[in-house]
Amino acid sequence: MSSVPVTAQTAGKAAARAAVRRRNRGSRATRVAQRRPGWVTYALLGIALLISIFPLYYTLLLGSSTQQEVSQNAVPQWLPDLSLFDRFATVVNASQINFWKALTNSVIISVTASLAVVLFSTLAGFAFAKLRFAWRRGLLVFVIATMAVPTQLGVIPLYILMTDLDWVGKLQAVIVPAMLCPFGVFWMTQYLSSALPFELIEAARVDGASMLRTFRSVALPAAAPAAAMLFLFWFVMQWTMFFWPSIVLNSQNPTLPLVVQSLQGQYFTDYSLVMAGIFLVTFPLLVIFAIVGKQLVAGIMTGAVKG
Amino acid sequence: MTALHTPAPAPARGNPDPAPRRVGFTQRLSRWDVKLSPYLYISPFFLLFALVGAFPLVYTAYVSVHEWNLLGGQGEFVGLQNFADVLGQAIFWKSVGNTFSIFVLSAAPQLALAITIAALLDQNLRAATFWRMGVLVPYVVAPVAVSLIFGRMFADQYGLINAILGGIGLDPVGWHSDRFASHVAIATIVNFRWTGYNALILLAAMQAVPRELYEAAVIDGAGRFRQFFSVTIPQIRSTMVFVVITATIGGMQIFDEVRMYDPIGLGGPSRNWMTTVLYLYDVAWGNQKNFGRAAAVAWLLFLLIVCIGLINFYLTSRIAAADGDRSAVSRRRTQALIAQAQAKARAGSRAEAPTAPLPAHAAALPDDGPPGQAPPGRTTRSTRDSGGQR
């Protein structure tokens, strides 16, 4: 039994390899299209990369200089030194800054909001893509239309609402509005309608699974790749968000972007400390980016929208 | 699934055998499950939208026609007085002018740079992922941090940019004192953060361009630049429009960068870089604490965005006319072909001819989103991965 498939497989592999060789030989035009770019491309990209990271490097430089050096020289030195860590310690230990609290808050807000967005979007996306119900199409069009509404413009009533709920200064004032993401619903609907075959759902139903069970064991695993992308986006978006948190939160209970603001307020004459603080605030997301940046890039290229 | 539609017979009272009763209950439960689940699944989104999306938008209108104070709460009904007050304030108009100026200064160079970077990345690069991640680094730095860093680099005295200008023998620029210069600096902050992101979106569109077009262009003797302008640019036009529209919506709401550009955060000594959202913030939570007026500002800004959206829509439909027509024709032709095939199948003697021309899930795809809102390249992109496979 084993010999026949193996032969077939080898033949298939050989054929595939031959096809690849034929394709690679290709026409002159194909070869031109496949050619590696010259050094000019790399040089230009190198410049773009330098511009991308230079401001961060510059914050390190200013952060490791003294207040006096910063106020007299545009570039006090060309390499950061160990005094940087003293500045870090000053920022972290400054009682007015609440650095650790801000870090915890940022993690809580970003993770909770992103998890909620992923869950709600997958639920709604599953319903829109795979289930039949009245008004389905109309409601989906409605969801897409809400993507065009700038939610920032409702900040005043939202603030009044938060005051009435007595949520001002509390994390839920940031988390609850951040759970709304029409794009996520649209994205999941798109993804699930192509990635989840109807046969799988029917099979689960025939086996006696309830709708919730079907969602959990069939739709959720199928949605995992898209869910990961959505999570990443929303996480970055919430982590860097400033406008709304600056309105409903305060310096006793800040997020990291608010820490940046209070650094400027506290030490704006000592730019060395401000810069060290900025780097410290930016660092966690840079680490995350180094780990999952590849997925984030792939996600943006699969089509994200700007918030 | 078919069993769901046969109602279970009501079990007789006092039936000693519990089995049929349980089946009936389960079936009824299952029918309700099927009927209600979709609504349950979409309800979290819609409830949230009602609470934090729709309600505030509508309520803004209510607030805008009342006297309303941050501390005192709702006052009396004043009609359109708040709107009149806002429109009568010179600072409001200045903020609108600033917003437009900063937006234009950021959108145009951003798009040009993003296309250039995308074109560079759209080659058979070694370590393609590394370069892509490299240009995305600014995106993960919070706008407030970027603004502070650049605020320092653009400092009027001892700033890096002015030092460089001095180094090549130019006069220092008043990046904070001069109105136009401050707009350039703030636009630079915006560009720094978003260029790489937009480059990746454009790159995705570029990768969806069929390689045969380039091969044909090469055979026709087109060089790199000719290929770029005659093949790439026309092919990614709709994505460019998408990028412009999102940049517009974002540009009209710019706040973080201008708030953090100086330590005071209210647009400079003579409000030289105060944008409309910053003005809204100042009216509501800053000096005036006047929610009624701020709500009026919000509505005026909303109208402004709608106007620009309509202009965009008009331009889009004109620019993308060629693309749109082609796809409309092809869709019509596809339908005609399907109809033809169906007719043939019906006329033919084959009894098992398929009755449904399309798989059911094809109908589930929303094929017409609002223009520009549909993420680019979703439908057209093949699964082709980065450079190596081409």
Image (cartoon, grey):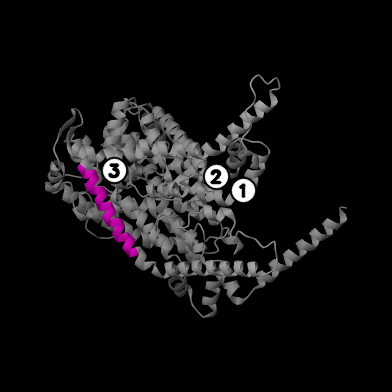
* Residue occupied by mark 1: A198
Dot label at residue A131: 2
Q: Residue at x 50, y 38 (%)?
A: B41
Q: Counting other residues with Cα less than 10 Å from the Cα at mark 2, is it few (<14), some (14-19), or many (20 or more)?
A: some
Q: Quadrant of the C terminus of chain B?
A: bottom right
Callout 2 amino acid: Leu
Q: Position of residue B114 (x, y in %)?
A: 40, 59
Amino acid type at mark 1: Phe
Circle 3 sits on which residue?
A153
Q: Chain of mark 3?
A: A
Secondary structure mostly seen in the magenta stretch: helix
Against A241, is B126 above or below? below
In this rendering, the label closer to the viewer, 3 or 1: 1
Give the mark nearer the N terminus: 1 vs 2.
Answer: 2
Q: If you read the primary sequence from the N terminus, does the residue marked by circle 3 or circle 2 appear first? A: 2
Bounds of the magenta span? B296-315
| Residues at marks 1 and 2, CA–CA distance in whole angstroms | 10 Å
What's the amino acid at mark 3? Leu
